[in-house]
Image (cartoon, helix red, strand yellow):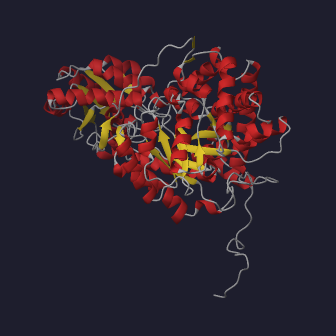
Amino acid sequence: MSATTDELTLAAEFPPASYDDWRKLVDGVLKDAPFDRLVGKTADGLRIDPIYPRAQGCAPVIGRALAAPWQVMQRIDHADPTLANKQALEDLAGGASGLTLVFAGSPAARGFGLPPTREALTRALDGVYLEADIALALEISPQGLDIGDHLAALLEARKIAPSTVDVRFGFDPIGGAAARGGFAADWSAKAPRFGAKIAKLKAQGFRRPFACADGRLIHDAGGSEAQELAFVLATGVAYLRALEQAGLSLEQARDVIEARLSADADQFLTMAKFRALRLLWARVEDACGLAPKPLFVTGETAWRMLTRRDSDVNMLRATIATFAAGLGGANAVSVLPHSLAVGLPDAFARRVARNTQLILLEESNLARVADPAAGSGGIETLTRQLCDSAWALFQEIEKAGGAFAALQAGLIQSQVATVREARAGDIARRKAVVTGVSEFPNLREATPAVLAPAAAPMPHAKEAISFEALQPLRLAAPFEALRDRSDAILEKAGKRPQVFLANLGRPSDFTARTTFAKSLFEAGGIEAVDGDGGTDPTALADAFKASGARLACICSSDAVYADHAAAAAKALHDAGCAHIYLAGRPGDRETEFRASGIADFAFAGGNALAMLQAAYANMVTP
């Protein structure tokens, strides 16, 4: 083999493939089915085709400096400042390049967080060399608005110049109001104080962003990608106006604003979202008469995709989300530990969160290529569609009077609710799968160790100006509630609620639907007990009685159902079965099947959540 740099010609022996060639092959598989069966839709209704040509004439969307890694941010949220300090020092020694200090009561706290006091801040940062290029990001609560002053005092005591510290203050009064559902005063009265606080910190020599346009609130509440982007734009523009009124030039105001976005396990959509934000913000800058500069964007792995059940799968979700945010050009990434929905993460969970980023950066070298998505037909198309959709939503918010006025009017909340309800329907029908929860559940999983259990969210005090709050959610929660119910029955009675899988015929007849039914019922915490198969109604009834179950699900092929399902159902009914299901659609035999005692049909695309919720009412629990 000769050493040459010539382009490989492995495909030279094959005829060139065209889109038409591919389409002919696809049509042959689809037969008479419409091609649109292969077309997907995002929550914003954006079209996702199964194949795209290479995009032409596309320039890279640059966020970070060329070949520069993103900042590896580690969340510090322990309520004890001394223990929080220990975690911070361990994280920095383990490879983190920045710390995100989460204060109790902030929208990102998740029931935990540092006390918002000067003493807690000072203790948490003891031994942390802030002047040594360690990034610091703050998640501030309404009670912690003086954290900036506390940090300035701390630096003064340490004789550190504020200009040498890489800190992002995260002031986001509009986002905080959206999360709480109100404000103490109208934004027109609040804006001057917001601008004055930032102008003061800037005059003290701090150089990094002070104001934060935070889209995570929309994502947490179940909103779409375009809605998240539109909220960031609207909030950012509101802060530009407030800062200009406080005496900063538009260019100075632009430089003190950052953005934060959620990154989830939809890799391509997340990449497109991060790219779209930079293009959209550049359009705002153009409208302000400014030469566009890269916006500082932090990505955080999404809260709503975390699960309490089979929480180890969260590691995989976080890896994909981090991958997508990094390749999408995020300047900093924070990984929520995989056990955060269970409770306060321990050292192992924190180490996994940190190493998720370090492996992608140090071993996979993901930061070496600037915008690897440039020219990709699919991602370029998604980016452009997101830009168009988000800009239209942003214009609606501006017509309503801006971000705060749109929240007061309920415009943003109603748009988010529409998407949230549609997604909830997809989750209920298992069209949108939550791996380890709504699909492939494990009733014998181990619960991860945590330092403290998850706390119930504290109710917010009623504000002078009130509106509907953007409440955070987790997609897995409805199915997890059923699992909690099952656990309570297990603790009280010594066994879980059960369903007997009445397998008919041979394994080749029933295995596919038995597997489906087992996954379906155990997603609701109802343990599946397998039958041995066969077609003898008496043997089936005896096996059901021996199982101790109160429910039964008949599983087999349509052909076997035609000959044996009715007799099997009658035998189960006579044996005392409280409720009989059949795995699959009944077709034209529904009347016959129901007459024999079959009450419900379990099939792909049905409302699994509603069926499982009803199952608890259909049985007499032990």
Q: Number of labelled discs?
A: 0
Residue 570: give x, y in percent of width and height. 24, 22
Judge from the rendering whether residue 325 lies leftward or rightward of residue 46; answer left or right.
Answer: left
- Please tell me which residue is depicted at 45% across the width and 24% down the height of the picture: 588
Residue 365 picture quarter? bottom right
Residue found at the very far bottom of the displayed protein: 2
Residue 82: give x, y in percent of width and height. 36, 44
Judge from the rendering whether residue 168 lies leftward or rightward of residue 561; answer left or right.
Answer: right
Judge from the rendering whether residue 346 lies leftward or rightward of residue 322; answer left or right.
Answer: left
Judge from the rendering whether residue 497 lies leftward or rightward of residue 283; answer left or right.
Answer: left
Residue 251: give x, y in percent of width and height. 79, 40
**Quadrant housing the N terminus:** bottom right
Residue found at the very far top of the displayed protein: 464
Residue 249: give x, y in percent of width and height. 80, 36
Work out whether residue 196 can be spotted. Answer: yes
Above or below: residue 511 compared with residue 243:
below
Above or below: residue 448 compared with residue 432:
below
**Quadrant housing the C terminus:** top left
31, 543: nearer the viewer:
543
594, 41: nearer the viewer:
41
305, 343: nearer the viewer:
343
Residue 392 picture quarter? top right
Work out whether residue 405 can be spotted. Answer: no
